[in-house]
Amino acid sequence: PGQRYEAETAPAVCQGTIDANWAGFSGSGFCNGTNAAGAYAQFTVNPSAAGTASLGIRYANGAGSARAANLIVNGSAVATVSFEPTGAWTTWATKTMTVPLTTGGNTIRVDPTTTAGLPNIDHLDLGPTAG
Ligand code: GCU
Ligand code: CA
């Protein structure tokens, strides 16, 4: 099953607005990041064990081109992510990746690298930790 963290729920941070105007999101809304480099969305996850975990970030990108971001875990950039177009702002997709986590609170930030900013971000699903 794993654990779900909504982008609109503290202690998540959205550098933009929490919106609910495009259907299909979970919870009560999604993070509409400001269209600017560095306007990030951040989750704080609490895995039950340290190790490597797979996670999924659900997003919608109704724009015509992919939006790029750095994936920053506990302050360190661990990967780059490309959020490809989903065709409509109401069409949501999940980007999966693997990250190293410690026990306790871990910050996971998607930090856009271009002036396009992030796609709309719905939630993060954390899988079990291994290794
Ligand atoms: C539109 C859309 C927003 C989206 C934005 C963007 O304004 O309504 O939900 O965040 O485009 O391009 O990021
Ligand atoms: Ca936006």
Image (cartoon, rainbow, N blue to C red):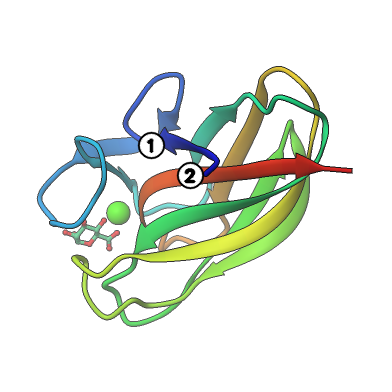
Which quadrant of the figure has residue 82? bottom right
Q: Amino acid at mark 1?
A: Ala
Q: Residue at x 28, y 43 (%)?
A: 30
> Nearest the camera: 50 or 7?
50
Identify whether 97 is placed above or below 31: below
Quadrant field for ligand 2: bottom left
Identify whether 69 is placed above or below 40: below
> Nearest the camera: 33 or 105?
105
Identify whether 83 is placed above or below 47: below
The answer as to whether callout 2 falls within 8 Å of ligand 2 is no
Crowd rating for badge 1 (residues with CA inside 10 Å; few <14, some 14–19, many 20+): many
Disc 2 and disc 1 in contact, CB within 8 angstroms? yes
Q: Is residue 30 left or right of residue 10?
A: left
Toward the right, the furthest residue is: 131
Q: Is residue 22 left or right of residue 129?
A: left
Toward the front, the furthest residue is: 1
- Asked whether residue 118 appears in the rendered view, the answer is no
Please tell me how many numbered marks the rendered image carries: 2
Where does label 1 land, which residue?
A: 7
The answer as to whether callout 1 falls within 8 Å of ligand 2 is no
Where is residue 127 shown, x and y percent of the image?
62, 45
Q: Residue at x 40, y 44 (%)?
A: 123
Where does label 2 land, which residue?
A: 124
